[in-house]
Image: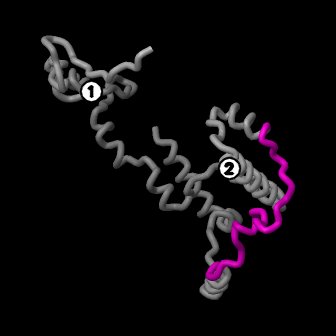
Amino acid sequence: MFPLRSGVRLSQSLRSSSPRFNASLSRSYSDESDLADIFSMIGAPNWSVKSLLPNPASKPPQTITPKELHHLLRISALPQPASAEEEQSMIDTLESQIHFVKEIQLVDTTGVEPLPRIRDESSDAVKEHTIGVEQLKEYLAKEHTSGRRGRIQRIVGVKNDRPDGEAWDGDALKSATKTEGKYFVVEIGESPSL
């Protein structure tokens, strides 16, 4: 019923059985001198994202044409620029983004394994997301075993006919701001003359 329990038993047995497994399962912590070195490295920034952006003083030749910009905006279902200044601003922004992506692509990633998932895998996060018996007590109390083989069955409880709370009183006009008899009244503005 609890697959987590077998995983815990397996890891406990591996820890106790062989020193070879102990080395792979234990975590080595650094001493205070290593921490001081780390803090000195990350204490003062020595790099900026701005170094990946194009230099505003030297204007590289424009690679995106207005026709390409209009095409990209159209296939992205984005509004077209209203003026020539807005169009030039969009082209400049797109140029800087393309330059940024090209700089990121130049980074050497040999030997770097990609992350299998993006989430917090610390021991505190694992404890927080682990479902244990404490969380299941309420649901386990609604079950009982029956029969020779100990089949687990849910205890039939009282059916909640109104899970959303109070019953609807049938008065749809109660929240209307203006009514006429048994109908809603909707105010509309003057329609433009044709």
Of 146 and 173, nearer the camera is 173
Label 1 neighbourhood size at 10 Å, few (<14), some (14-19), many (20+)? few
Does residue 174 lie above or below 97 as drawn?
A: above
Q: Residue furthest front?
A: 193
Q: Where does residue 186 sit, x and y in percent of width and height? A: 26, 20
Check disc 2 and report its element: helix, strand or loop: helix
Mark yes or no: residue 110 visible: no
Which residue is at a point 71% across and 67% down the rendered structure image? 50
Query: In the rendered structure, which segment of residues is drawn in magenta?
Result: 42-67
Which residue is at a point 29% across and 40% down the rendered structure image? 138
Q: Where does residue 169 sit, x and y in percent of width and height? A: 14, 20
Q: Badge 2 is on which residue? A: 85
Quarter of the image for the C terminus: give it. Answer: top left
Image quarter for residue 109? bottom right
Image quarter for residue 121? bottom right
Q: Amino acid at mark 2?
A: Glu
For discs 1 and 2, the disc positioned in front in the rendered view:
2
Which residue is at a point 82% across and 66% down the rendered structure image? 58
Does residue 21 lie above or below 183 as drawn?
A: below
Image quarter for residue 46? bottom right
Which residue is at a point 79% across and 56% down the rendered structure image? 99
Which is more N-terminal, label 2 or label 1?
Answer: 2
Does residue 22 lie above or below 177 as drawn?
A: below
Is residue 8 one of those drawn in magenta?
Answer: no
Q: Badge 1 is on which residue? A: 155
Q: Where does residue 77 sit, x and y in percent of width and height? A: 64, 32
Of 14 and 108, nearer the camera is 108
Check disc 1 and report its element: helix, strand or loop: loop
Q: Amino acid at mark 1?
A: Ile
